Image (cartoon, grey):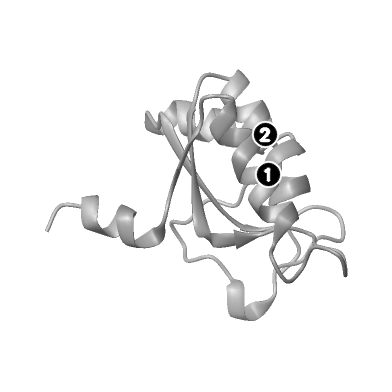
Amino acid sequence: ETLRGDLKIHPDAMPADTEAVIATGEELHQYCKQKGILFLFFLGFNTNACILARDYGTIEMAKRGYEIIMLRDCTTGMESFETYEELWQTRGAILILEMFGKYSLTSDELIAGLPK
C-alpha cells in the first residue's frame, strides 16, 4: 500500500484499520493534541540519530511540551566497529536525554508499573 509518494509499508507491518500512520513531527503533534496524549515513549532503531534528532524525535517533541520516556532495553543506536560491543552510541544517546531532564526505563520497569 502506498502512503505518500513512493513510501510503502511492508505487508507484515501493515497498520490495523484504527492505527494511525504518522510521518512527521507536526503530524505526531497534531495526533497527540487531538487524543490528549502528554507522554511519549521512544524505542526502536537509531537512538543516536533518528530518535534524538528527527522532527518526530525526543528533542523536538520535548520542545512541543511532551514528557519523553526512553525504553533503554528496546532501542539501539547506529554503532561503529569501535562501539558496537559495548553499545557506546546507544548508551551515550540515552545519557544525553537523561542529563537534560528526560526519563528512561527498562521494559520490565514499564510493565511492572502498568495496572494489573
67 left or right of 24 in image: left
Residue 91 versus residue 107: which sits nearer the camera? Answer: 91
In which quadrant of the rendered image does the N terminus lie?
A: bottom right
Residue 15 location, x and y as percent? 54, 65
Residue 53 versus residue 27: which sits nearer the camera? Answer: 53
In which quadrant of the rendered image does the C terminus lie?
A: bottom left
Residue 103 versus residue 99: which sits nearer the camera? Answer: 99
Cα separation between marks 1 and 2: 19 Å
- Residue at the left extreme? 116
Task: Find disc 1 in the rendering and name its residue.
Answer: 93
Regarding mark 1 in the picture, which secondary structure is present there? helix
Q: Residue at x 51, y 31 (%)?
A: 102
Regarding mark 2 in the picture, which secondary structure is present there? helix
Residue 86 location, x and y as percent? 69, 65
- Tell me if residue 78 comes above or below residue 50 in the rendering: below
Residue 23 visible here: yes
Residue 46 visible here: no
Q: Residue at x 79, y 59 (%)?
A: 78
Q: Residue at x 51, y 35 (%)?
A: 31
110 left or right of 59 in image: left
Q: Residue at x 40, y 32 (%)?
A: 37
Badge 1 amino acid: Ala
Badge 2 amino acid: Gly
- Tell me if residue 48 comes above or below residue 37 in the rendering: below
Assess disc 1: are there few (<14), some (14-19) or many (≥20) residues with their C-alpha within 10 Å of its C-alpha: some
Residue 87 location, x and y as percent? 69, 62
The image quadrant of residue 38 is top left
For the residues labelled 1 and 2, say whether their Cβ atoms are less than 8 Å apart: no
Mark sitting on residue 8? none
Assess disc 2: are there few (<14), some (14-19) or many (≥20) residues with their C-alpha within 10 Å of its C-alpha: some
Residue 13 location, x and y as percent? 60, 73
Task: Find disc 2 in the rendering and name its residue.
Answer: 25
